[in-house]
Image (spheres, rainbow, N blue to C red):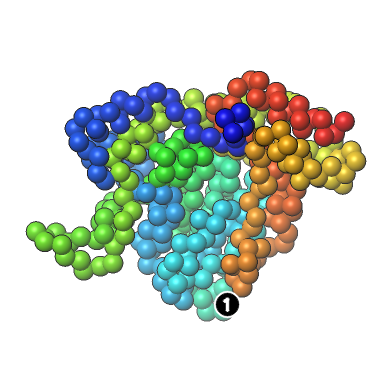
């Protein structure tokens, strides 16, 4: 397994050790501490938001974001269908109903037209729409101008799921700063990692202070353990935050390396009939967390499909994965409403995520390309 080429493995810089060592030297090994405070400050400074809460996962951040907006039983939360399950699961934690919205072909993200259709229909049914979760898939900025315009017209708070998009920008502004509440993930496969972790960001100080309170078991200000609200154990440890501080020192390098991977794939594979890549719209800058291709068997030589290429790579111990299976096609959400056509479904049927780690070597990239090119010869 040591020789396996992974889809997106952690990439440590060496800077992490000084922060982790400091935590050990000062005995700050429990949750919270100087590294947590410093990591939150680093995130705010880099993204351009006023406040941040470092948490145990991106899922925890989404859960708290919904709590901050008062989501409860019987409410509706609109959510991009073409995403990972963590974008939708917290809606159900709170007893609300996820209403899924299709993607568009320009960015593969939330379709503004389908979104407005969903809003009008849900309101016609008398439903209370509490929030919209919009995702920047694989680091690609969604059509934020159009989405924010719709949110403003219908008075629906935007939760920006930037779990995959740290370092990406839209109209020159960092993703993770556009929503009323914004979410990041630092899972082991993300562009930077804290081993496991996430963050909730907002310009609203009250949201972040309340989320920190709830994330530490909602302990009241008392000399004994007293709780007036239900809380959660969601705060990031001081050690993991130290890893994050070291990773933040190289975030721009990691973005550049991921984008270079994507450029290499485009240069090496775009001549093959039937292969296309995730577009990057004007005014958008993607961190290219994962390099994603569409392989259309109706256009490829010999009808080669996404699955043919994936299996060929797997035979050489190279990990590649299909694009996310849309939420409205998942068994657990089969009864949830869906608005749109079949854009997300087609992307899933024909899309493939290629190895994209910032620690890929030139030799490994050449191996990957060689296998893919061989499928079409």
Q: In the rendered image, which quarter contains the C terminus?
A: top right
Number of labels in the image equals 1
Examine the rendering and report whether any part of residue 356 can be seen: no
Residue at (63, 34) in percent of width and height:
355
Residue at (44, 28) in percent of width and height:
12
Residue at (19, 32) in percent of width and height:
26
Q: Position of residue 45 (x, y in %)?
A: 35, 35
The answer to which image quadrant residue 25 occupies is top left
Which residue position is annotated with label 1? 124
Q: Residue furthest top?
A: 362
Q: Residue furthest left?
A: 223
The residue lying toward the viewer, choosing from 114 and 304, is: 304
Residue at (59, 64) in percent of width and height:
100
Q: Position of residue 361 (x, y in %)?
A: 60, 22
Q: Residues within 10 Å of mark 1 (few under 14, many from 20)?
A: few
Left or right of 211 on screen, residue 62: right
Q: Position of residue 365 (x, y in %)?
A: 66, 25
């Amino acid at each position: 397994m040591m020789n396996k080429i992974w889809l997106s493995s952690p990439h440590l810089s060496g800077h992490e050790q000084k922060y982790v060592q400091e935590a050990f030297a000062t005995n700050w090994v429990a949750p919270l501490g100087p590294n947590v405070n410093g990591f939150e400050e680093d995130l705010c400074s880099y993204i351009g938001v006023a406040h941040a809460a470092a948490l145990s996962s991106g899922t925890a951040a989404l859960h708290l974001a919904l709590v901050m907006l008062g989501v409860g039983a019987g409410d509706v939360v609109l959510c991009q269908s073409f995403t990972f399950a963590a974008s939708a699961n917290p809606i159900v934690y709170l007893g609300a109903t996820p209403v899924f919205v299709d993607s568009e072909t320009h960015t593969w993200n939330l379709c503004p037209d389908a979104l407005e259709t969903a809003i009008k229909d849900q309101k016609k049914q008398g439903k209370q729409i509490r929030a919209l979760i919009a995702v920047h898939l694989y680091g690609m900025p969604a059509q934020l101008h159009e989405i924010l315009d719709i949110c403003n017209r219908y008075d629906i708070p935007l939760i920006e799921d930037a779990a995959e998009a740290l370092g990406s920008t839209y109209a020159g502004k960092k993703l993770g700063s556009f929503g009323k509440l914004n979410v990041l993930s630092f899972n082991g496969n993300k562009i930077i990692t804290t081993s496991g972790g996430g963050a909730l960001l907002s310009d609203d100080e009250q949201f972040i202070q309340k989320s920190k309170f709830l994330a530490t078991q909602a302990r009241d200000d008392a000399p004994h353990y007293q709780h007036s609200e239900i809380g959660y154990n969601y705060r990031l440890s001081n050690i993991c935050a130290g890893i994050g501080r070291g990773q933040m020192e190289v975030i721009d390098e990691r973005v550049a390396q991921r984008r270079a991977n994507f450029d290499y794939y485009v240069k090496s594979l775009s001549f093959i009939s039937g292969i296309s890549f995730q577009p990057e719209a004007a005014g958008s800058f993607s961190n290219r967390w994962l390099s994603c291709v569409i392989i259309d068997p109706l256009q490829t030589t010999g009808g080669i499909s996404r699955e043919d290429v994936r299996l060929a790579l797997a035979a050489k111990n190279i990990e590649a994965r299909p694009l996310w299976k849309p939420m409205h096609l998942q068994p657990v959400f089969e009864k949830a409403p869906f608005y749109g056509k079949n854009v997300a479904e087609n992307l899933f049927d024909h899309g493939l995520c290629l190895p994209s780690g910032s620690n890929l070597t030139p030799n490994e990239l050449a191996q990957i390309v060689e296998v893919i090119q061989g499928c079409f010869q």
